[in-house]
Image (cartoon, rainbow, N blue to C red):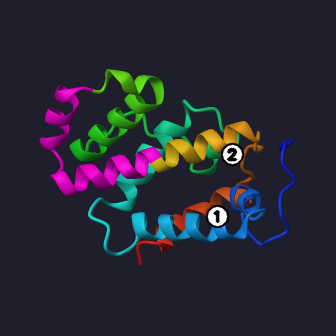
């Protein structure tokens, strides 16, 4: 059971929690749109797989279940790199060094690296907040709703 009473807005539990502070909810939603929208350079699928990987290591039950678990293997080298970096950030970001950036540059431009890292860091904070307030695991309906939401942002 969450440690914070969820607002009564029509949204998933994460956004209902943020709904206690409408101005923060609005800004949070706009950042999601900016990170996922048509101006994005990194695909939603790559960012979402990185988020799923990250979520398994931060402690937010809702975040770890809402998008499902990441795939075990990634044939796409860009996705594999994004997931590896997300895992490294979640488990020990202090180990990220110049060699990590050299590896990132084999798959991503500087602009894409900034976008990917900004996304992962935004979602790291999101996951940490969800863990602190103890959001419950996602229901099946919430999982479907999230998938629809995440992919509608890129349209």
Q: Eyeballing the image, is 116 above or below 106?
A: below
Which residue lies most toward the bottom here? Answer: 155
* Residue found 76% across the figure and 56% down from its top: 17
Q: Eyeballing the image, is 7 above or below 121?
A: below
| Residue 64 appears in the picture as rendered | no
Residue 136, horizontal then vertical, whole percent: 78, 44
Where is residue 98, by image quadrant?
Answer: top left
Residue 86, horizontal then vertical, whole percent: 40, 37
* Residue found 30% across the figure and 45% down from its top: 79
Image side of residue 42 versus residue 68, left or right: left
- Look at the image and say whether residue 66 sits in the magenta stretch: no
C-alpha gap between disc 2 and disc 1: 19 Å
- Residue tagged 2: 62
* Residue found 48% across the figure and 65% down from its top: 31
Q: Eyeballing the image, is 121 above or below 140?
A: above
| Residue 104 appears in the picture as rendered | yes
Image side of residue 101 versus residue 18, left or right: left
Q: Please rate how many residues cluster around mark 1, counting C-alpha atoms within 10 Å: few if below 14, some from 14 to 19, many from 20.
A: few
Residue 107, horizontal then vertical, whole percent: 16, 45
Image side of residue 104 versus residue 45, left or right: left
Do callouts 2 and 1 mark residues in contact (Cβ within 8 Å)? Answer: no
Q: What predominant SS class does the magenta segment belong to?
A: helix
Q: Eyeballing the image, is 110 above or below 99?
A: below
Q: What element carries label 1?
A: helix
How many numbered marks appear?
2
* Residue found 31% across the figure and 55% down from its top: 115
Q: Give the range drawn in magenta.
A: 97-121
Q: Quadrant of the C terminus?
A: bottom left
- Residue tagged 1: 24
Q: Which mark is residue 3?
A: none
């Amino acid at each position: 059971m969450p440690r914070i009473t969820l607002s009564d807005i029509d949204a998933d539990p994460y956004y209902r929690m943020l709904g206690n502070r409408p101005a923060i909810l609005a800004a949070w939603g706009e950042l999601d749109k900016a990170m996922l929208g048509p101006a994005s350079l990194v695909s939603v699928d790559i960012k979402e797989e990185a988020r799923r990987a990250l979520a398994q290591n931060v402690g937010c039950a809702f975040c770890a279940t809402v998008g499902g678990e990441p795939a075990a293997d990634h044939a796409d080298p860009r996705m594999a790199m994004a997931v590896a970096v997300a895992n490294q950030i979640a488990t020990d970001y202090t180990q990220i060094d110049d060699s990590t950036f050299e590896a990132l540059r084999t798959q991503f431009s500087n602009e894409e690296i900034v976008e990917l890292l900004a996304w992962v860091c935004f979602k790291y904070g999101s996951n940490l907040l969800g863990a602190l307030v103890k959001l419950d695991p996602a229901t099946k309906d919430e999982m479907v709703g999230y998938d629809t939401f995440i992919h509608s942002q890129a349209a």
